[in-house]
Amino acid sequence: MHISEVLKKKHPAISFEFFPPKTEASSTDLFQTIQHLVPLKPAYVSVTYGAGGSTRELTHDLVVKLQRETSLTIVSHLTCVGSTQDEIYQILKKYDESGIQNIMALRGDPPKTQKQFVPVPNGFPYSADLVAFIKKHFPNMGIGTAGFPEGHPDTPNRLTEIENLKRKVDAGADYICTQLFFDNRDFYDFCERCEIAGIHVPIIAGIMPITSRKGMLRMAELALGARFPAKLLQAMTRADSDDHAEKVGIHWATEQVMDLIHNNVKGIHLYTLNKSKATLHIYDALGIQTFDTLQKQD
Ligand code: FAD
């Protein structure tokens, strides 16, 4: 099913993100996590594409395995990093032949050795070009694109940035999924700015529960933006153990999710980091057993 169809429901679609495991042991852990999360009936799950295009095969293998062995709706991430148009075509063809109907089309970040993103010869400079390519060659594929409520550092001009986002939607993206954020006001403001710019596709809110102080520092390094509100930082500083820090992080994410649902968000994408605990806690705290519970209220 296309994600655009999933997003037509009146109540929010809750989805989960996984990354492809690199070892046997982490693969076993991931499938245990999936077993715990499948009963929550997510609207869809997505599988990331390693930074620098590093997990091309692993992403493909996990996506195809999930497609074959579960009833989940799958979104495969794909970036422009390190791939020519021909290579991208071959990757998309394989997905198409495996029955994958949804691609999250991204530019990707440059490999650690490069400061700026440089497209390979005959590759794509921007994700809008990838979106247009998918639309042209695989018109039946559903396409998602990335949005940045706190802004993307490559384009400090926020007006230009929204114009660039609109290019991706005009090229054929069906929906936007955002980078993680910790202050819902950033998300609501982003949605309003999209509306003003004439971007009317559904916007899914990306939420990542902090599960440790170390994880928070890593987020600050990796995620673009990740503005930590003082109230959250204060609570994390007060936490006297990793266990408490995790409780604070999950509580914060739960409050964010509750507020987003209250404000009729179209979708919430939970960055699970391949663990089930935070997601299960959030569902529990919200009093929802499954995605269907929300859908029944339509
Ligand atoms: P683009 O839309 O191409 O934008 C990149 C920059 O270029 C922006 O600053 C934009 O404003 C600017 N720009 C766009 N068009 C133009 C133009 N025509 N002229 C001038 N400037 C322009 N990374 C991975 O490696 N693997 C993943 O699986 C992955 N999943 C992600 C999922 C989500 C939901 C999000 C939000 C991000 C994800 N990322 C992933 C990170 C993402 O690839 C990086 O943040 C990347 O730097 C931007 O990707 P983009 O698709 O938004 O790029």
Image (tube, grey):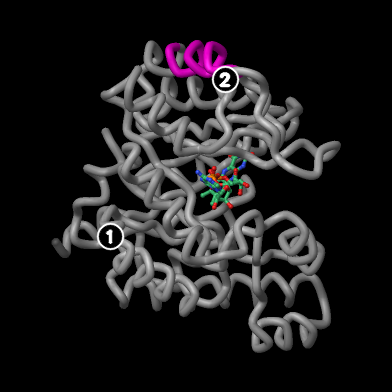
Q: Which residues are magenta?
A: 84-93
Magenta segment: does it hold 87?
yes
Q: Is residue 211 left or right of residue 170?
A: right
Could you say whether the residue bearing mark 2 is in a helix, strand or loop? helix
Residue tagged 1: 198
* Residue 153 place in picture, x, y as percent: 66, 59
What amino acid is found at the position of numbered circle 1 in the picture?
Gly
- Rendering quarter of residue 188: bottom left
Residue at the image position 65 percent from the left and 54 percent from the top:
154
Residue at the image position 47 percent from the left and 65 percent from the top:
159
Question: 284 or 156: nearer the eye?
Answer: 156
Q: Nearer the viewer, mark 2 or mark 1?
A: 1
Question: 87 or 55: nearer the eye?
Answer: 87
* Residue 111 place in picture, x, y as percent: 77, 36
Q: Quadrant of the C terminus?
A: bottom left
Q: How many marks?
A: 2
Residue tagged 2: 61
Numbered circle sitting on residue 125? none
Q: Which of the two discs, 2 and 1, labels the residue nearer the N terminus?
A: 2
Residue at the image position 73 percent from the left and 54 percent from the top:
222
Q: Is residue 96 left or right of residue 153?
A: left
Residue at the image position 74 percent from the left and 43 percent from the top:
116
